[in-house]
């Protein structure tokens, strides 16, 4: 490392300082040699109190931690990696961010252009590595004394922030700034914290499209992932039943029909009369909802989602709008019929003395209050929550852009880092093991308050509901799909410094949910 200024450090310092000045002040890095100038600049900004800096051991966990932080804050996270496979390990998080509209700015360090395609160490084609999953991509050649490239930074940052945050009425998402660095790779000067750039944000007023719908057509409001309270407000304004997924942010209020799956599947006197479905967010959990959207006798109206992007799985939507009103007085008889059916189904549901998935979901919903966060893993348990979760306005997160189990723990860590609030995670054993490396928390992050509530049924029980479970021999099914595991979770938790609490009854679960710190609550089924 040079003590005097180098072109690499000068470019990195000004780039990071400008990004932070533009509002991207939460930075996530993983160790690497080629990215050292960026890391030093990030450290200088953090030491000066201008940025929040978080370090992770591997880039896959890094990407999802940054995604969780951006989810919770609504502001772009900056991700810094070295070259080679480090960049490729971001791909799952980049895809999730792309499909769920989460703002990430990826600073991927690279070798100089002359070292590409000649077999140089840790060098691959990083340009285009994310294909169309990034909103915008820059490939910046290595700065030199003759060409310091500093005059390009303002334009790069402005365009990156506009594309990542979607301020021009577009879907937010990831942006890649691929930066080549030539040796010497870093220096202590200039200090990034001593720059005071000004970034002019660009805003474009969105075009608002209204729909005036006839009040006579029996309608339901479908609230998928990230629908938000607007779905609840619309349903309550016009007396429509609200069919809201647990990660919708809309599963509350008098209009929320919690047993909507059973009604759609078993009550044709109600389901068969639906003439219109108004869709918010991205509904992906229920086959009954999907079947409804493909029903040619049902008119589909989609309320645009800024984050989840274009949604029209049946390619039948008659309109994509921003706001809705109706042309006549509200008739609440339709809603009352759904409410009666909903109450009948829920009251008739069998109650057991055992601690099952229903009791687990209900206990977690009851324990989660106010500013607490709840993260749902994308496997069987979010579907159980769709059936059993009470109607309650709480902060629920889930990676539903691609609905993968990738990075669930890391996402929750990013949420906890950003909010400073207790964050519960409801997940299965395979979802936990898929992201076990994210149990390693940087000591500099402080004492995070995270509960991992792990329902351990020793494999992928979600596959039991699918077609092949009925056709394959049990031994073959277990080998190919259930993937049974016998990992000792107490030992795993201890290795990463988490407290392990075994739970086998409802009272013990409620008590465990009052614990603070980093806790792994294991429920064996």
Image (tube, rainbow, N blue to C red):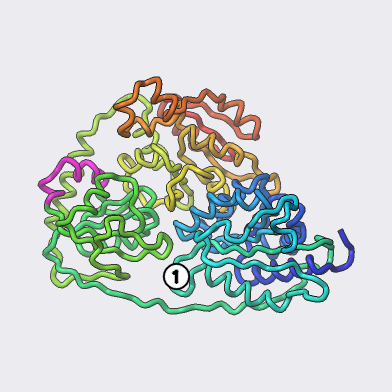
Relative placement, left or right, of 168 versus 355 is right
Q: Nearer the viewer, residue 491 or 424?
A: 491
Q: Does the rendering let one see residue 396?
A: no
Residue at 26 percent across and 69 percent down: it is 324
Horizontal and vertical percent position of residue 283: 33, 52
Relative placement, left or right, of 164 versus 154 is left
Q: Nearer the viewer, residue 144 or 308?
A: 144
Main SS, magenta residues: helix
Relative placement, left or right, of 454 versus 304 is right
- The C terminus: image quadrant: top left
Residue at 12 percent across and 53 percent down: it is 273
The crowd level at tag 1 (other Cα within 10 Å; few <14, some 14-19, many 20+) is some
| The image quarter in which residue 377 lies | top left
Q: Is residue 394 magenta?
A: no
Q: Which residues lie in the magenta part?
A: 258-272
Q: Is residue 264 magenta?
A: yes
- The N terminus: image quadrant: bottom right
List the residue tagged with mark 1. 170
- Compared to residue 447, the image places residue 26 above or below, namely below
Horizontal and vertical percent position of residue 408: 51, 44
List the single residue furthest toward the right. 3
């Amino acid at each position: 490392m040079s003590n005097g200024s180098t072109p690499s450090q000068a470019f990195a310092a000004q780039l990071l300082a400008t990004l932070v000045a533009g509002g991207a002040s939460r930075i996530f890095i993983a160790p690497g040699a080629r990215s050292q100038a960026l890391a030093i600049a990030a450290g200088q900004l953090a030491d000066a109190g201008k940025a929040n800096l978080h370090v992770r051991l591997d880039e896959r966990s890094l990407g999802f931690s940054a995604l969780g932080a951006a989810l919770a804050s609504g502001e772009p996270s900056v991700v810094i990696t070295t070259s080679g496979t480090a960049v490729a390990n971001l791909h799952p998080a980049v895809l999730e961010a792309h499909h769920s509209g989460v703002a990430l700015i990826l600073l991927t360090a690279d070798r100089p252009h002359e070292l590409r395609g000649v077999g140089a160490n840790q060098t691959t084609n990083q340009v285009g590595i994310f294909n169309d999953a990034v909103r915008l991509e820059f490939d910046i050649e290595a700065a030199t004394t003759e060409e310091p490239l500093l005059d390009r930074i303002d334009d790069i940052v402005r365009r990156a922030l506009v594309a990542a945050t979607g301020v021009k009425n577009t879907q937010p998402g990831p942006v890649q700034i691929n930066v080549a660095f030539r040796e010497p790779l870093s220096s202590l000067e200039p200090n990034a914290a001593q720059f005071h750039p000004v970034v002019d944000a660009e805003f474009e007023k969105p075009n608002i499209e209204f729909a005036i719908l006839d009040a006579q057509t029996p309608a339901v409001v479908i609230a998928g992932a990230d629908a938000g309270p607007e779905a609840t407000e619309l349903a309550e304004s016009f007396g429509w039943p609200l069919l809201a997924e647990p990660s919708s942010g809309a599963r509350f209020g008098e209009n929320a029909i919690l047993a909507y799956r059973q009604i759609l599947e078993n009550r044709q006197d109600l389901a068969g009369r639906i003439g219109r479905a108004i869709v918010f967010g991205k509904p992906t959990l229920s086959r009954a909802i999907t079947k409804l959207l493909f029903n040619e006798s049902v008119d589909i109206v989609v309320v645009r989602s800024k984050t989840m992007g274009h949604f029209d799985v049946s390619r039948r939507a008659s309109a994509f709008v921003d706001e809705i009103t109706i042309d006549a007085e509200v008739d609440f008889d339709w809603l009352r019929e759904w409410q009666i059916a909903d109450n009948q189904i829920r009251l008739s549901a069998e109650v057991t003395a055992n601690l099952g998935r229903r009791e687990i979901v209900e206990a977690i919903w009851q324990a989660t209050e106010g500013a607490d966060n709840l993260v749902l893993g994308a496997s069987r348990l979010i579907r159980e929550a769709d059936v059993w979760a009470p109607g309650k306005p709480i902060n629920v997160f889930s990676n539903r852009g691609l609905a993968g189990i990738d990075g669930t723990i890391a996402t929750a860590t990013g949420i906890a880092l950003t909010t400073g609030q207790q964050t519960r995670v409801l997940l299965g054993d395979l979802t936990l093991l898929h992201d076990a490396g994210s149990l390693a928390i940087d000591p500099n992050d402080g004492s995070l308050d995270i509960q991992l509530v792990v329902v351990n049924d020793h494999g992928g029980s979600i596959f039991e509901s699918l077609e092949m479970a009925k056709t394959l021999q049990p031994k073959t099914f277990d080998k190919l799909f259930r993937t049974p595991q016998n990992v000792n979770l107490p030992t795993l938790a201890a290795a990463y410094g988490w407290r392990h609490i075994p739970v086998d009854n409802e009272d013990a679960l409620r008590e465990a949910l009052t614990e603070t710190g980093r806790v792994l609550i294991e429920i064996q089924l």
